Image: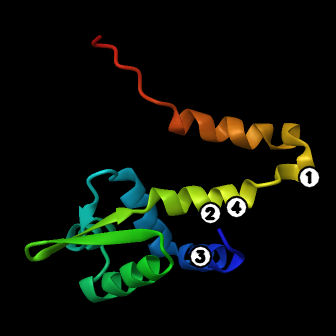
Amino acid sequence: MENEQVILALAALAQGTRLDVFRLLVAAEPEGLPAGEVARRLAVPHNTMSSHLGILSRAGLIRSERFSRSIVYRADLDALRGTVAFLLKDCCGGRPEICAPLMAELSPCCSPKVDTDA
């Protein structure tokens, strides 16, 4: 990932509503959410939400797919992964023990779910 793409992604997320939208779409993976539902859940007017969704799309953080009259938005998890990897690459100047607390904090949210029905 290039500096410019990371800067676009971080700039898009550096606004409260867009950060809320992105987090909502990450939580809604893999199904995504229609634009109107995103606007409703965050209590943002549709025209304002359209602008926020456009900025996140141009930054490469979300993608959309049309289904009939509805547009469903999804977080681009590869873009998220690339942005985070860019920020953590060469973590702490080759001293990974310094980044261990950060990695430990990320692990619980991303651990695979264990199927207890098996």
Q: List x then y, in percent, for residue 2.
A: 68, 73
- Report the side of 14 relative to 93 (left or right): left
Label whose residue precedes the other's in the sequence (4 or 3): 3
Q: Residue at x 41, y 27 (%)?
A: 113
Q: Residue at x 42, y 78 (%)?
A: 57
Return the residue found at the far front: 1
Which numbered marker is on residue 93? Answer: 1
- Which one is closest to the eye, mark 2 or mark 3? 2
Label whose residue precedes the other's in the sequence (1 or 4): 4
Q: CA distance from mark 2 to mark 3?
A: 14 Å
Task: Report the residue marked by disc 2.
Answer: 83
Q: CA distance from mark 2 to mark 4?
A: 5 Å
Q: Is the C terminus in the top left, top right, bottom left or bottom right quadrant?
A: top left
Label whose residue precedes the other's in the sequence (3 or 1): 3
Q: Are marks 2 and 4 in contact (CB under 8 Å)?
A: yes
Amino acid on which the number 4 mark rests in the picture: Phe
Amino acid on which the number 3 mark rests in the picture: Ala
Q: Is residue 33 above or below residue 54?
A: above
Crowding at mark 4 (Cα within 10 Å: few <14, some 14-19, many 20+): some
Return the residue found at the far left: 68
Q: Are marks 2 and 3 in contact (CB under 8 Å)?
A: no
| Label 3 residue SS | loop
Task: Report the residue marked by disc 4.
Answer: 86
> How many circles with numbers are drawn on the protein?
4
Which numbered marker is on residue 14? Answer: 3
Label whose residue precedes the other's in the sequence (1 or 2): 2
